[in-house]
Image (spheres, rainbow, N blue to C red):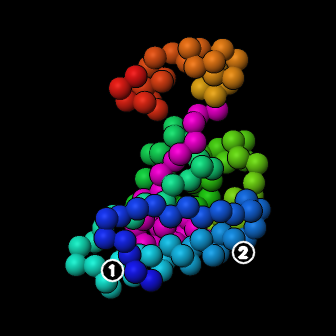
């Protein structure tokens, strides 16, 4: 596997409830990090974005990757069962690989409370301070 010198992004499709898909994602993450470490003179950053986790829980993901909490604590503190309908256990291989490899996990989803405001009143219904959580120059 050759890494692109200018960086880039890799988007992996999945079936949310497929353990096999998430095992494959974890394997690909391990391969990317291993290849980067072997072929690169500089350790280009690698991060893993998660649509499953709302941005308000970024500190929880940071603490998990840093080894400050267990997988089950992360599940509870991200309110997984309330905010994402797919089984947490299916994603376990990805989370474990990220923690083991010290790959940052990045929360990508909007907070459900903000989404409800926008669904009800459009983007103007989102207070400016909340909008700045997503768009820094808003």
Give the labeled residue for mark 2: 20
Q: Residue at x 73, y 59 (%)?
A: 16
x then y, percent, for residue 36? 35, 77
Q: On the rendered image, what quadrant is the C terminus found in?
A: top left
User: Does 75 sit left or right of 60 as displayed?
Assistant: right
The image quadrant of residue 71 is: bottom right
The image quadrant of residue 7 is: bottom left
Residue 36 seen by the camera: yes
x then y, percent, for residue 31? 48, 80
Task: Mark 1: give few (<14), some (14-19) or many (20+) Cα within 10 Å.
Answer: few
The range drawn in magenta is: 93-113
Q: CA distance from mark 1 to mark 2?
A: 26 Å
Task: Mark 2: give few (<14), some (14-19) or many (20+) Cα within 10 Å.
Answer: some
Q: Secondary structure at mark 1?
A: helix
Q: Residue furthest left?
A: 41
Compared to residue 106, the image places residue 29 above or below, namely below
x then y, percent, for residue 115? 64, 28
Residue 64 seen by the camera: no
Q: On the rendered image, what quadrant is the N terminus found in?
A: bottom left
Q: Residue at x 51, y 55 (%)?
A: 49
Compared to residue 81, the image places residue 127 above or below, namely above
Identify which residue, 69 or 89, lies in the foreground. Answer: 89
Q: Which mark is residue 37?
A: 1
The image quadrant of residue 65 is: bottom left
Q: Residue at x 50, y 64 (%)?
A: 10
């Amino acid at each position: 596997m050759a890494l692109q010198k200018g960086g880039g992004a890799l988007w992996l499709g999945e079936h949310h409830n497929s353990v096999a898909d998430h095992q494959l994602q974890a394997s690909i993450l391990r391969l990317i990090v291993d290849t980067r470490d072997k072929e690169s003179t500089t350790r280009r950053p690698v991060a893993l974005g998660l649509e499953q986790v709302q941005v308000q829980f970024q500190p929880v993901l940071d603490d998990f990757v840093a080894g400050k909490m267990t997988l089950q604590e992360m599940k509870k503190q991200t309110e997984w069962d309330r905010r994402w309908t797919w089984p947490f256990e299916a994603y376990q291989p990805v989370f474990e690989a990220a923690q083991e490899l010290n790959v940052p996990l990045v929360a990508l989803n909007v907070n459900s409370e903000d989404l409800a405001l926008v669904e009800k009143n459009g983007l103007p219904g989102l207070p400016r301070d909340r909008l700045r959580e997503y768009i820094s120059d808003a």
